[in-house]
Amino acid sequence: MQRLLNARHELSEVAGLPRDVHSFISSNSAPADLRDRHNTLFRNTQTVLDAVDIHDRSVRGDISAISSTTSDQLMSSIQSLKSKWDGFRRELQQAMPARASSEHYRIAEQPGGSMQLSSLTPSPYRN
């Protein structure tokens, strides 16, 4: 179960976007198909994160089992979504240079091996 919870945490980390990148998507600056992919990917990610939480509570006995989804099925969904987020970030990086210099964004490999689009501009919201 701990492996599943660790994978859940990795997925929640991979699914985040810097504020300026999210602004690019939500302000209709991004192409419509990219916005649609983001919305679908975000929705699917939230569904899987919720399913893992429910599965964990069921395994711990906090609630009775309400789903027949197995840990292996959830792990497969998490790996698939992580891969989709990586691909989405690559496409997003190609779409963003029209709005901002590509020097401001780089794809960074995270400790878990996933790729994340990172802003090289310091954020006023981080220490």
Image (cartoon, helix red, strand yellow):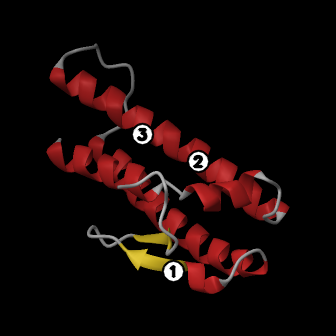
Q: Is residue 45 above or below residue 98?
A: above
Q: Residue at x 36, y 46 (%)?
A: 74
Q: Amino acid at mark 2?
A: Phe
Distance in Å between CA atoms under marks 1 and 3: 26 Å
Between residue 96 and residue 88, name the one nearer to us.
96
- Give me the C-alpha separation between circle 1 and circle 2: 21 Å
Number of numbered markers = 3
**Whole-number angstrom distance, CA of label 2 to CA of label 3:** 10 Å
Vertical order, 42 against 93 (above or below): above
- Looking at the image, which residue is at 39% across and 60% down? 79
Q: Position of residue 61 (x, y in %)?
A: 18, 17
Q: Three-letter amino acid code at disc 1? A: Arg
Residue sitting at x 51%, y 37%: 47
> Callout 1: helix, strand or loop?
strand
Nearer to us in this view, 5 or 59: 5
Local SS, label 2? helix
**Precedes in sequence: disc 2 or disc 3:** 2
- Tell me: 63 left or right of 35: left
Q: Nearer the viewer, residue 93 or 72?
A: 93
Which circle's residue, 1 or 3, is located before the other in the chain?
Answer: 3
Q: Quadrant of residue 43?
A: top right
Q: Position of residue 118 (x, y in %)?
A: 49, 70
Front position among marks 1 and 2: 1
Q: Earlier in the sequence, mark 1 or mark 2?
A: 2
Q: Which residue is mark 2?
A: 42
Instruction: Indicate the amino acid at tag 3.
Output: Leu
Q: Which mark is residue 14?
A: none
Residue 12 location in percent, x, y? 40, 49
Circle 3: element type: helix
Q: Which residue is mark 3?
A: 49
Residue at position x 45%, y 41% in the image: 48
